[in-house]
Amino acid sequence: MSRGQITAFCVGAILFIAFGLVWVIVGKQRRRYLERLRQTGYRATGVVIDYEYRGGADGPVPYPVVQFPGPDGRLITAESTFGGDLIPEKGAEVPVLFDPDDPDTVHLEHGIGDRGPAIIQATGWAS
């Protein structure tokens, strides 16, 4: 190997490690937020009324929009933090977890929302 190839390999390895470290840190923060939300947040039963589409690598990704009663009884409409192919259908009732100080975003306590591939769970990225 030439000196340039060794340098390129080392730089690539360092970037790969740095990306992995950032991924783990962000995943751990997300997991802590979710655990705090489970301890102090409000739970309600919501209904999926629509989908909000966000850009993804393979095209738009659907995120459920749910409607549910807040602590004061008024209806709240919010977007889920979990999207993809394995989301509930429109009209489905789903348990939601939300922060009353920020009810615009909810976590669906939906079975697939708490699971992910083993490698993702191991790093703490799954929410």
Image (tube, helix red, strand yellow):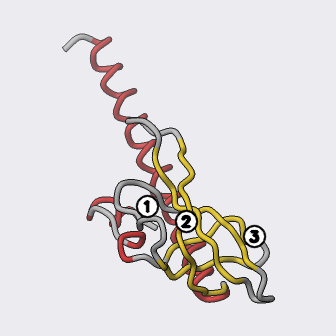
Residue beneath label 3, please? Answer: 102
Q: Is residue 32 left or right of residue 84?
A: right
Q: Measured from the top left, where is residue 126 in percent x and y?
A: 41, 64
Looking at the image, residue 16 lies above or below residue 86 = above
Q: Measured from the top left, where is residue 73 in percent x and y?
A: 77, 88
Q: Amino acid at mark 2?
A: Arg
Q: Compute the Cα span from label 2 to label 3.
A: 16 Å
Report crowding for label 3: few under 14, some 14 to 19, many 20 or more residues within 10 A (C-alpha). Answer: few
Q: Nearer the viewer, residue 12 or 96?
A: 96
The nearer-to-camera label among 2 and 3 is: 3
Q: Secondary structure at mark 2?
A: helix
Mark closer to the chain start, 1 or 2: 2
Q: Residue at x 75, y 89 (%)?
A: 71
Q: Kindly check if marks 1 and 2 are in contact, taking CB atoms under 8 A apart as contact.
A: yes
Residue beneath label 1, please? Answer: 125
Q: Compute the Cα span from label 1 to label 2.
A: 7 Å
Q: Nearer the viewer, residue 78 or 97?
A: 78
Residue beneath label 2, please? Answer: 30
Q: Secondary structure at mark 3?
A: strand
Q: Is residue 33 left or right of residue 101?
A: left
Q: Is residue 42 left or right of residue 12?
A: right
Q: Amino acid at mark 1?
A: Trp
Q: Residue at x 80, y 88 (%)?
A: 72
Mark closer to the chain start, 2 or 3: 2
Q: Amino acid at mark 3?
A: Asp
Looking at the image, residue 126 lies above or below residue 59 = below
